[in-house]
Image: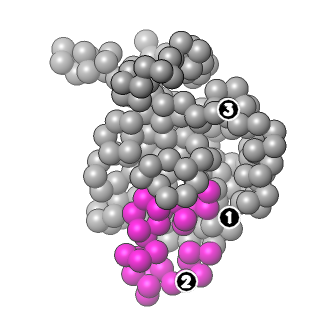
Amino acid sequence: MDPSYPEMLDKLRALRESADPKDRSWYTSFVFFQAKETAESLAEVEQRTGMPVPPELKVLLLDVGGFCFPMHVAGFALTFHTHAPYPRPFGGLADLLHARWVWKETRDPENFPEDDIARPNANFVCFALCDLDDDSAEHYFYDRNGNFGVLHYDQNYRDRKAVDYLYELCKGVNSRPPMTLEEVLAKPLRDCLYVEENDENDDSA
């Protein structure tokens, strides 16, 4: 039976409490925790992005803090702080696409003009990212109404539905049904926290 979302959050808390920052080989090879957010630091995020942090995400960041599983390329990272290979903190969706994929320079300016950089930054805040392979990742975001969503981005544009969704977000619109934080985070957390068990299940298949 798959672990529940509360069980996964409990495991994250336990990992934070048991991790020894002096043991860098273990600490960074499995999961790296950042300092827990504070009311002041989240207020700075809200001021910088112009949008309130949704209550359930705020609770997670205050309780567990930001973290990164350094697997695959950049792994799975949930944070508002700078984390390699990103040159700036997570924030506006277009800024994160550029930091991860140099999107502003590689986009087709005919299909994605300058206005299409401003709109996703003004309407969607990216707070987490999970790499799928060298060319694609899932980007987790929220809007000013506190609704969550997931953008699949492939720098080779192989997924037509994903490209159409990016076009839509670049118009400042999100017609997909809003997601809860649990719906957004359950799968990447399960894949990262229980990677050894998943590998064993794959071997037995």
Amino acid carrying mark 2 in the image = Glu
Was residue 104 drawn as part of the magenta stretch in this picture?
Answer: yes
Whether pointer 1 and pointer 2 mark residues with C-beta atoms closer than 8 Å, the reply is no
Amino acid carrying mark 1 in the image = Asn
Labelled disc at residue 123: 1
Q: Which residue is mark 2?
A: 114
Labelled disc at residue 36: 3
Which one is in front in this view, the residue at disc 3 or the one at disc 1?
Answer: 3
Left or right: residue 132 versus residue 103 is left
Left or right: residue 22 versus residue 143 is left
Left or right: residue 69 versus residue 203 is right
Q: Is residue 60 above or below residue 90?
A: above
Residue lying at 39% horizontally and 63% vertically, measured from the top left: 101
Neighbor class of circle 1 (other Cα within 10 Å; few <14, some 14-19, many 20+) is many
Measure the alpha-carbon separation of dots 1 and 2: 15 Å
Q: Position of residue 146 (x, y in %)?
A: 73, 48
**Nearer-N-terminus badge (3/1):** 3
Measure the alpha-carbon separation of dots 2 and 3: 35 Å
Name of the residue lying farthest toward the bottom = 110
Residue lying at 51% horizontally and 22% vertically, measured from the top left: 21
